[in-house]
Image (cartoon, rainbow, N blue to C red):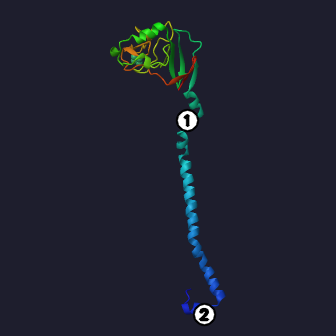
Amino acid sequence: MDRTNEEQDNMPTSELQNSAKAGEPEADEPRRRDFIHIAAASFAAVGIVASFWPIIASLYPAADVIAEGTITVDLGPIEPGQRITVEWRRKPVFIHHRTPEEVAAARSAPLLSLPDPQLDRDRVKRDEWLVVVGVCTHLGCVPKGQLAREPRGDYGGWFCPCHGSQYDTSGRVRRGPAPINLEVPPYRFMSDAEIRLG
Ligand code: FES
């Protein structure tokens, strides 16, 4: 019940103090409300981060994916003229230890007659080593020619039996429907006898 000013003037001091204390909760009310709002906002923030965590986590590659992305290849056992295939990022990669004759054949190709003109020296880091992804650029077949007994086409590189594309000793398309040369993957020499792919 409200008291008039005159009634309050006549109230004992102790009653006035009690009356003031009775009003304190109203003064504290904003602070409690602030706390409730802050707490609610914090829970909401945690909830949002938690709900997005699978998406955030998926932005970081798993350790096995990182490991798979880089492989080291020992070139020591590969004789001149030999070719080996390694798997890198689930794709075959052809590594060809070229003979001087195979290098010369690649260098003598008339550049302007190539469907995808590219200098041999721009496709290799060292003359004797060619490294290309072994996937035909037409529709994705794996070309023949890694084994000496397989057909290599008219240019001594690779022959794709799916629709007849032919690649030379630089992995460049020379004939058939393949639109571009075999891809050169990212790699670097770690030593004279070792490369790292990826
Ligand atoms: Fe190689 Fe068609 S997939 S020629």
The x and y percentages for residue 57 are 55, 41
Quick one: quadrant of the N terminus? bottom right
Would residue 47 appear left or right of 140 to someone viewing this image?
A: right
Q: Residue at x 55, y 28 (%)?
A: 69
Q: Residue at x 66, y 87 (%)?
A: 14
The x and y percentages for residue 150 are 48, 8
* Above or below 116: residue 82: above
Q: Camera-side residue: 149 or 71?
A: 71
The residue tagged 2 is 10
Q: Residues within 10 Å of mark 1 (few under 14, many from 20)?
A: few
Q: Residues within 10 Å of mark 2 (few under 14, many from 20)?
A: few
Q: Camera-side residue: 175 or 112?
A: 112
Q: Residue at x 57, y 64 (%)?
A: 36
Count of marks placed on residues = 2
In the rendered image, which quarter is residue 63 located in?
A: top right
Q: Where ligand 1 lies, by image quadrant?
A: top left
Label 1: state its secondary structure.
loop
In 3D space, how far apart are the residues under numbered discs 1 and 2 (Cα atoms)? 78 Å
Label 2: state its secondary structure.
loop
The residue tagged 1 is 61
Q: Residue at x 45, y 15 (%)?
A: 143
Dot 1 or dot 2, earlier in sequence: 2
The x and y percentages for residue 86 are 54, 19
In the rendered image, which quarter is residue 22 located in?
A: bottom right
* Above or below 127: residue 46: below
Q: Amino acid at mark 1?
A: Pro
Q: Are marks 1 and 2 in contact (CB under 8 Å)?
A: no
Would residue 154 appear left or right of 64 to someone viewing this image?
A: left
